[in-house]
Image: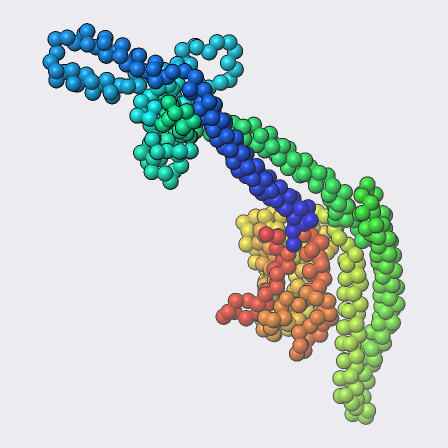
Amino acid sequence: MKSIQQRLLTSLLIGLPLLWLLTSSFIAWRFWHETNEINDTQITQVARYLVSISGDDDLEGDYEKKRLEGKKHKSKSHDKKDKRDKAGDEDDDHDNDHDYAKIYKLKDGELLGNLGDTKDDYMGFAIWDSKGRLLMADENGQSFKYLANQQGFVDEEDSAYQRLNPFSRQWRLFYIHDDSLRHHEGRVIAVGQNLKVRREMIAHTLQVQILPMFIGLLAFLGLVIWSVRRGFAPLTQISETLSSHQLQDDSPIVAEVPKEVQPLVTALNELFVKVADTLEREQRFTADASHELRSPLTALKLQIDLLQQKLIEQQISQPKNNPIDDDVIYHTERISEGIDRANHLVEQLLILAKLAPQQQLPKSELQRIDWLSLTDEVLASCNRQAREKSIQLKRLVECENAEDILPIEVNPTLFKLLLRNLIDNAIRYSPEGSIVELQLTPNSIKVIDNGFGAPPDQIHRLSERFYRPAGQSQRGSGLGLSIVHQIAELHGLQLQISNRALPETGFMVTVNLPG
């Protein structure tokens, strides 16, 4: 399960940008719509204004005057041409009717003074008479197309839109007919707005609005990350303190934490005192119990040894007069074995009690050791037990240099106990005449036997305290592998228990480096 801090950061760092994106998209959509609405309203207002003032000037009279002057000028320059040429001139004159219209060239500086940030190509207008002759326009409007039947805006669905293509894709065009005055009846007025300029204006306005919002979002996300980490810093400090806190240490946690976390810290401090007191009483009880148990067990062992020796002497000195019942000898041997088993159990319990409270070994107790020398001592101590079952102890070093064997610092006493328990276990559960092998590698130590292994479904439970698979005939307490597991954990090592791969039979225990 993810940490609360990670889940909170993930939710905020994903949710806030998504919320910002949805909000910004809605604002951009509404702004685009409202801006288009304002510009369309502006176009219609300009069109109404042109309708109201278009009758003030005698545009048609001015148009005819310019046209006649043009024809008179042409007639003087073409006197020697035939009638066919004159007819062609009349057609050319008709084609160039817009040359006689009143054109406002604002780009030539007719507007004086400070014009600010105005754009010459932002809007345009054109006025035609009922015959389609251009009467008045500006530089942009003189390129507009005359549409006699068009009213209102030219939409994409309109057939006129296709006829104006691609021109209408650049301008938003509005057509209106002036039917208010009889002598101007049929006059057509067109007002257009450059869509490119309009879109640039909208894009720049959105950029001015959204860019600061985006920068603000990044700053807010940074503030969220800083605030969340700062808020969880006391919990991180408590976690680090707990990871290094010894179970037998009852000193309280000292940290500045929020009010919501303070009850947890108080409860932990109270728990430390209870745990330390419990462990102290457990250790004291274990030490007292082991001492009290060892004394009577030692006395019983001594008495049973004396009894066995007495029976043997009596059997030798008086073999015929007072023969000793074989059952008596058998039961004394069983009693001796039971006492040995009890002594072994007491020793294992004492070791386990000493190991359990520890979370880590002091640095002063760790050192680099000579693995060959240490394993020599362990194998020598187990040799008598192995000879009793005719088992051969074998050591295999899979390194060119002994210094490369498991290059870590360990507690020599604890590791001797670990190896002795593993080899004792292998000897105990291996048949007579088999081989127990101790393998030393750069990353691990393995103990392999030729026994019958363990049921696969029970292997994961073998390191539990007092657990022994059903049907075992060998003596044991069920604590050997549990002690091995504890010692391996204290050194930061892993314990792997498995059966040997077929066709081999037997059991394999590996103590190796993690990873």
Residue farthest to the front? Answer: 182
On the rendered structure, is 445 left or right of 103?
right
Residue farthest to the top? Answer: 76
Q: How is the image coloured?
A: rainbow
Question: Which residue is at the front of the view, 259 or 72?
Answer: 72
Question: Which residue is at the front of the view, 113 or 329?
Answer: 113
Q: Quadrant of residue 429?
A: bottom right
Q: Is residue 306 above or below residue 484?
A: below
Residue depicted at 74% across the width and 47% down the height: 239
Q: Residue 106 at x, y = what percent?
A: 42, 14
Q: Is residue 346 above or below residue 309?
A: above
Q: Residue 469 at x, y = what percent?
A: 66, 74
Q: Quadrant of residue 299?
A: bottom right
Residue depicted at 85% across the width and 47% down the height: 252
Question: Which residue is at the front of the view, 221 or 262?
Answer: 221
Residue 364 visible here:
no
Residue depicted at 56% across the width and 27% down the height: 208
Residue 35 visible here:
yes
Q: Quadrant of residue 420?
A: bottom right
On the rendered structure, is 138 left or right of 232?
left
Residue depicted at 43% across the width and 10% down the height: 109
Q: Quadrant of the N terminus?
A: bottom right
Residue farthest to the bottom? Answer: 321
On the rendered structure, is 50 left or right of 305?
left
- Figure disc tally: 0
Q: Residue 398 at x, y = what percent?
A: 55, 54
Question: Which residue is at the front of the view, 464 or 99?
Answer: 99
Q: Residue 197 at x, y = what percent?
A: 45, 26
